[in-house]
Each structure stands twice: as structure tokens, then as C-alpha cells.
Image (tube, helix red, strand yellow):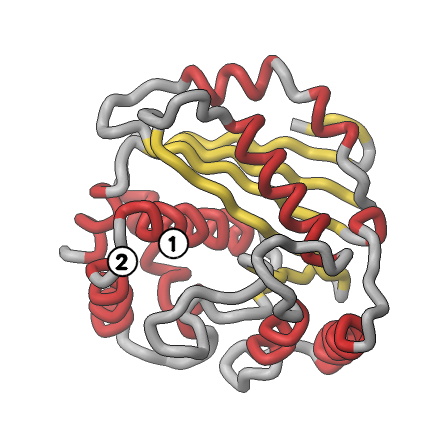
Amino acid sequence: MQLDTARSLHVIEVESITADMKKLLDSYFVSICEGDSDSEISLVKQRLAKFLKTKNEETQMGAVAEFFVHLYLNQLNFKQEFLFFNLEENSIKKGFDGLFSKNSETFLVESKSGTILTNGISHRSKLNTAYTDLKNYVSGKSDKGKNNPWKNAYNHASHIDVCAEKGIRKKIKKLRDMYDKGEYTDIKSYKIIPCSTIFLDSVWDNKENSNILKSHDFLKKYDCITLDAICISKKSLELFKEYLGE
């Protein structure tokens, strides 16, 4: 849904993993996880399944929510400038959840997720949190610590299997160096993709998707160059685990 010339809302329902969904997952699975690694998909699925088993349910939901965001953006011909698998074994990425590019322009992704059983959960609240996190990251005000988010982004973009353009790497490197010098930036200078995923505890209900389609004016208040807000309602965490275990 196009909200204005610079803002779009994408609302997605994942009630089951259909044959078409499985085909889509299979076609992008290795590249999302490992870039241009040429690994066998069965081995990469094993690696991800093993990773998820070591994490609590909240972290599992976060990882699976991110994966489907990356899948969606890849099929829209955004170029993924990072690996879903972090460079540090069994650790969570520091900084942005994703940095994509299209036509040499960069886009910052932040994904938030939760279960429908959480009191007061909504796509609106998750999008607000994602936007606030992006805003705080680039301005050096994140309450998650003073780690330079551009450093991890640059390390990922520089990985040989990511195949990032030199111009993209130079842009990220410049922002990394500015951040280290205490020269922070403003969210209004970025193209951003805040994301919300709600897991429905195995009982399908599209109420939250309907709500965000009816009430999205708050998105016009987000400072940015362009906005692509993504909202996903997913039936359960188990759907993806079953796909991994086939």
C-alpha cells in the first residue's frame, strides 16, 4: 500500500508454508544465510536449526521474523549486503538487523517481533520501537550500548560471499569512521525499513493486519527519506522449524 510518494506499507500473512512458499524459501535460503557460498541447502538448514535450538523462544522468534523480512526484501530485488549468519559463531548481530541496497542506495532494516499472547502487542507498537531503535542507532543514542553499528555493517559488507559493490562499502566505511569520531547522523537522512512480526500461537487471526491497514497515519510522522514499513502476521514459530527439519 502506497501511503504517499515516499512511504509504503507492506502487510503479509503467513498462515502456512505452501508449496509456493517452500519453493521461494528454497530459492533464497542459502544466499540469505551465507551469501554466495554455494553450500548445500540441507547443510545450511541444519546449521540454522542447530542455532535456533541453542536460543530461548524470544530469540528464536526474533531470528525467524528477521529471516522472513529478508526473504520478502530479496524477492523485491533488494540486494542483501550482509549475512544472516553472524560472523561470530552463535552470536546475535550487533547494530542494524539488516542493510540492503537497491540502485546503489542503502536501506536500514530493524525488525521487532513478539507473540500475540503479550499484553498490548500490536504492529503499531513494534514499528514504533523499530523506528526508535534505528533513530537512536544512527544518532549515537542507543541504550543498547555504544557499539558502532556501522562497524558490523562494514564487516558484513566486506565479506567476500556478500559481493557488495565497492561504492556501498565505501559509504558504510565513511559512516563507520564518522561514528568513531563522534560525528553522528540523523534518521531523516536515511531510507528505512522498520518491521513488525506477530506470532499467533498457532491460532490464525488477521486482526492485527487489519488494524494496521486501517490505522497507519502515524507512519507519516517518521522522519526519513523513504519508508517501507513491513508487517507480518505468522501463524506459529513451528512452521519454520518444520520446514528446517524436513
Q: Which residue is mark 1?
A: 63
Q: Residue at x 42, y 15 (%)?
A: 207
Q: Is residue 22 left or right of residue 219?
A: left
Q: Is residue 107 left or right of residue 198?
A: right
Location of the C terminus by quadrant is bottom left
* Identity of the residue furthest to the bottom in this view: 160
Identify whether 201 is placed above or below 195.
above
Q: Contact (CB < 8 A) between labels 1 and 2?
A: yes
Q: Give the distance between the C-alpha atoms of the residues marked 1 and 2, in whole angstroms.
A: 10 Å
What is the x, y in percent for residue 166? 73, 82
Q: Residue at x 72, y 20 (%)?
A: 217
Q: Which residue is mark 2?
A: 55
What is the x, y in percent for residue 5? 82, 33
The amino acid type of the residue labelled 2 equals Lys
**Is 85 or 14 nearer to us in this picture?**
85
**Is 80 or 114 nearer to us in this picture?**
114
What is the x, y in percent for residue 10? 58, 33
Near mark 1 (Cα within 10 A), the count class, few <14, some 14-19 or many ≥20, is many
Quadrant for residue 198, please give it: top left
